[in-house]
Image (spheres, rainbow, N blue to C red):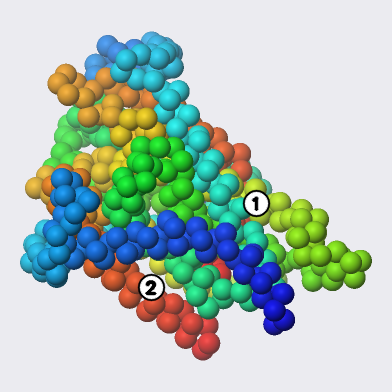
Amino acid sequence: MKLHSVLRWAVFAVAAFVMNFPILATLVTALKPPGEVTRNPSLWIESPTLENFAIVLTVSDRLNIYAYLFNSLTAALIGAILPILLCFPVAWALARRGTGRAVLFPLVVNLRALPLIIFAIPLYIMYATLGLLDTRVGLGLILAVVNLPLAFLLIVNAIQAIPLELEEAARMDGARLPRILRRVVLPLCRPAFLTTFIFGFITAWNEFLFGLMLTTQKAVPVTVGASFFFATSGGGVQWGVAAAVMIVAALPPLVLGVVMYRRIGGSMLGGAVKG
Amino acid sequence: MPRHTRRETAVLAAPLVLFLLAILGFPVILSVVYGLSETTFQTLRSPSFTGLDNFSRVIADDRFWQAAWFSLRFGVITAVLQCALGLFLAVYLAPLIARHGWTVAVLIMPMVVAPAMMGLMYRLSLHEFAGPIPHYMWQWFGWSPAFLNARNVFATVVVAETLQWTPFAFLLLLAAYQTLPRDVAEAARVDGTRPWRLFWKIELPLLMPTLWIALFIRFIDGFRVFDNIYTLVGSGPGGITTSMSIYIYEAFLRQGDIGRALAAAILLFGAAFTLLSLAQRLGRRRRAA
């Protein structure tokens, strides 16, 4: 019994170390002074410093991290909130009246399985016509499409779990549908909204392909901005600074994911089983 | 349904339907028009109709089939590896996780990092001068492979993808494992059934539906891979890590051949759609049986 417990901790430690190795290596590199990175590539830091983070967090001609972060934040908020607003009413109609069960629901849920590149090119042409290229709103709108499938699934599941009697009782009291939706259904959906939001925000923040194709300067998200650091023309990559940029870019979803890991696990099963 | 109820339902469905029509319906029409035309960035507003020319160019392009083969192989191999590892971790670590829930948070960290960032992190970790992995290889074994050369790059991207997304399979299977009825395991333990036998004969069959779902989702995501391969090696030495997504991206932005890119995208959509309907039909039959 004791032996098994030790073995389990060992398996956990190895899995955690191996799977998280790139994150760890990046963090270690970000904490090394410029001269040390190539002289000492080990995981041991001889003279730890926050210099690289100071460079990253200072606005310069080469890098304005705050602009990237602001672009990511705006686009990710649109991408996470819009699906909830769009799906809530129709999810109720689906759960209670079967609206869209034949076409709309499978269509939206199957979007999850399509390669995103299929949408990227026609959207590029459409955005070029509408002036939405290189805008945070344009990026946010397509991120909302990416998040629609899970939002729809989770909210439909949540509404199906609400006892019909609650709505019946409100109807008996003379409440009309808009009022029932707002006062009865909406409050009970809040946990599902929160899960949808967290998942959607992480997905939207981490998205790369649309940021790469649909933005060029003004609306570049931080995932794309960080990759600019590796495409330096002439001279080598400044590893320390590049590592610090990656840590800053990865931190928001990482913190959200670690704090909310229970929600992520539960929602994945709900989302997957029905899908 | 009475008429006012029907109107009510239409109002409820309108936001989502209109949004889908605007942001996906219009692009679908565009795809077809441009897919059948010769278009570059210079002639974006005035495509000239060329019929199925783009499609025949795509089908005649060896690199398109190489990309299709790459994506297929990559999707299958990574999905199987991730699900095997994820299943092992979920079942073996379940007793540990029951007492120390925080361990899950540590294990899922890779999957909440952007795949594009993960690709860059691997680029750093594997770099011959700045990377810790070659450093330790030299120190311990006096030798280090060129991880990104033509011979090793496929294995490298498979390992990178597997290590980032094993947590997904793990989390899904863990959630399913935790909902298995406890009394069966309890009864088996009292009867003196070996844990291995309990797993093989009782728990694994109960986990099969979730395992299929995990395999399917991981295959889909592996098949459509772009971000991490693109930031780690791009299309790779001699283009050997060109996935379908990377093929279309390069035809579009690097070569400016919009017609060919769209034709490839339409073919990819057709393949994905066929696969999806097949999988769903299989799933339904399984559930019915």
Q: Is residue B106 above or below residue B60?
A: above
| Element type at mark 2 | helix
Residue at the front extreme of this rendering: B46
Dot 1 alpha-carbon crowd within 10 angstroms: few under 14, some 14 to 19, many 20 or more: many
Q: Nearer the viewer, residue A110 or A254?
A: A110
Q: Residue at point 30% right, 18% down?
A: A62
Mark number, residue A193: 1
How far across and down, in percent of the image, does residue A2 sit?
60, 48
Is any part of residue B10 visible from this angle? Answer: yes
Is any part of residue A254 visible from this angle? Answer: no
Q: Residue at point 44% right, 77% down?
A: B280
Mark number, residue B276: 2
How far across and down, in percent of the image, does residue A10 sit?
49, 44
Q: Residue at point 18% right, 46% down?
A: B41
How far across and down, in percent of the image, does residue A234 sit?
14, 21
Amino acid type of the residue that numbered disc 2 sits on in the rendered structure? Leu
How far across and down, in percent of the image, does residue B226 sit?
29, 50
Spatial CA distance of label 2 from label 1 is 28 Å
Q: Residue at point 28% right, 26% down?
A: A229
Q: Is residue A121 above or below residue B210?
A: above
The mark total stands at 2
| Element type at mark 1 | helix
Q: Nearer the viewer, residue B124 or A223?
A: A223
Residue A67 lies left or right of residue B15; in this view the side is left
Subunit of mark 2? B
Dot 2 alpha-carbon crowd within 10 angstroms: few under 14, some 14 to 19, many 20 or more: some
